[in-house]
Amino acid sequence: MKYNPFIRFIPVLFFSVISLSLLSCQQVPEQKKNYLIGVINPNQGTQDINRGFTEGLAESGYIKGQNTTFITSVSSFELDQVIQDMVARNADLIFTVTTPVTRKAKEATRQKNIPVVYAMQDPVASGLIKSLAQPNGNLTGVQIRGSVPKTVEWMLSVSPEINHLFVPIKYDTKAAEQSLEDLQKTVSFLGIKVTLAEVNDQSELDTALARIPEDADGMLMLHSIFIHSNVDKLIHAAIEKKLLIGSAAAQSDLGVTITYGMIPENTGRQASRLASLILSGMSPSDIPSEVADFFLGINLKTAAASGVEIPATVLQQADIISTATLSESPLLKGDLLRPGQHLDLVGAYKRNMREADDRCIERSDVFLDTYQGGPFDGFLVDLLFKRDSVCNTQGSYTAREFYHIITNSNGDCIYEESDLQEAWDTTLVPNADYVVKVTAIDAAGNASTASMVVATAN
């Protein structure tokens, strides 16, 4: 079976995809001619927050290049000047990521009372708002603090014998101090020893990783920009020392074995909803701040390389499961999965390799990001490719090809014209419910047939 590096298995009802596509074209409130919105995020590890924020606003009718202009800064240099420029241009709203940026924006916007929507560690503990329920002033947003205690709990669920955590840290943001405070409270209750290694540059980090205590049985990444930017180096050390590595940020896709934290794009969308309320006329002081949604992620490749076995009970509770192995026997059992889980299957690229058993495929909808990625050698799946141009205004739709049913005859991961002969362009048929039946036959003569109901909406 052959997998594209970005094939996603998402076990949700087919019809939910259609409804989501239509809901994105929601009624747009009456707006002024053009909005000016500032976006400031110097944290290179969370740039997807920006994308989630702008895409979320677009779905609410604030569309870049049409009725909205974005001024975006992703540099940590000259932040004061960047903010002052946004204030001088009378921005309608400024979106800030990280505590230092939010603090500077609050001061700079005080006189003109320009709304600020933030995504930051802890606005209350940082003294920027009075409370999440009543932020007061011109600030509201999303708090991302709170994932550290649960991260430790998940690590213990995988390896109950953990009693000594190695924790590298650089105090480059207030978030680093606050997450360490959360960790110390958690381990004091659980009776876990912590070896804290303060590092300020690459040389100090290399030295600290070379001196990980022999009796350490886990490594934890806290909220530090420097630590997160060196995730590959920490994963390599964890594998070498056979340690379970965990992170209080959603980094399973980067290779961390156990992660529990916010997904940047989702948090950006969460913040965009608050921004949309402000742009429609509400005062930030009347909009309670929110806490980011946290997700459990598991990376089976790093787990296997570290000698860590993930219990089935933990796998069943994961929101995201990532694999990138050369396994010749299934690591994932479809009967153990629960509805709504998201699987990223990356590793298998030869006929004798497979990371998921047949039941994983049978129970899932399969989505490809590109036409170029190859589907599956002689194995029938309900292969759905979703292409949807975001509508600009209510009732304004571009022609959309919602779904194609595609098979690949020779399994070479390259689509030839013959491979697409059975592709179904749903824009050519009336909107209705259709029963689609597909039969796949591989080179050895093995055949499989399946049918599904497809609802078209153009």
Image (cartoon, rainbow, N blue to C red):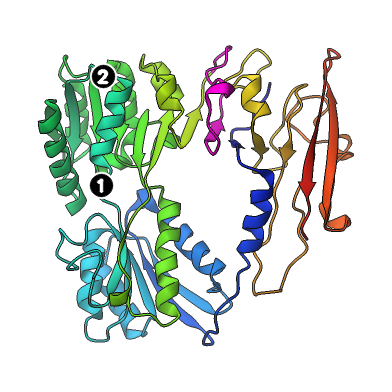
Q: Who's the residue at 52% across and 18% down the image?
A: 331
Label 2 sits on what residue type? Pro
Q: Give the quadrant of residue 147.
A: top left
Q: Residue at x 33, y 42 (%)?
A: 249
Residue 68 vertical position relative to residue 434 in the rendered view, above or below: below
Secondary element at image label 1: loop
- Look at the image and say whether residue 343 sits in the magenta stretch: yes
**Residue 432 visible within the image:** yes
Start and end of the magenta stretch? 326-347
- Indicate the secondary structure of the residue bearing disc 2: loop
Q: Residues within 10 Å of mark 2 (few under 14, many from 20)?
A: few
Please name whichever residue, 291 or 301, is drawn nearer the observer in this view of the structure. 291
What label sits on residue 146 in the rendered view?
1
Q: Is residue 63 magenta?
A: no
Q: Nearer the viewer, residue 232 or 318?
A: 318
Look at 60% across and 69% down and name the residue there: 26
The residue carrying mark 2 is 160
Query: Which x, y percent locates residue 104?
Result: 21, 70
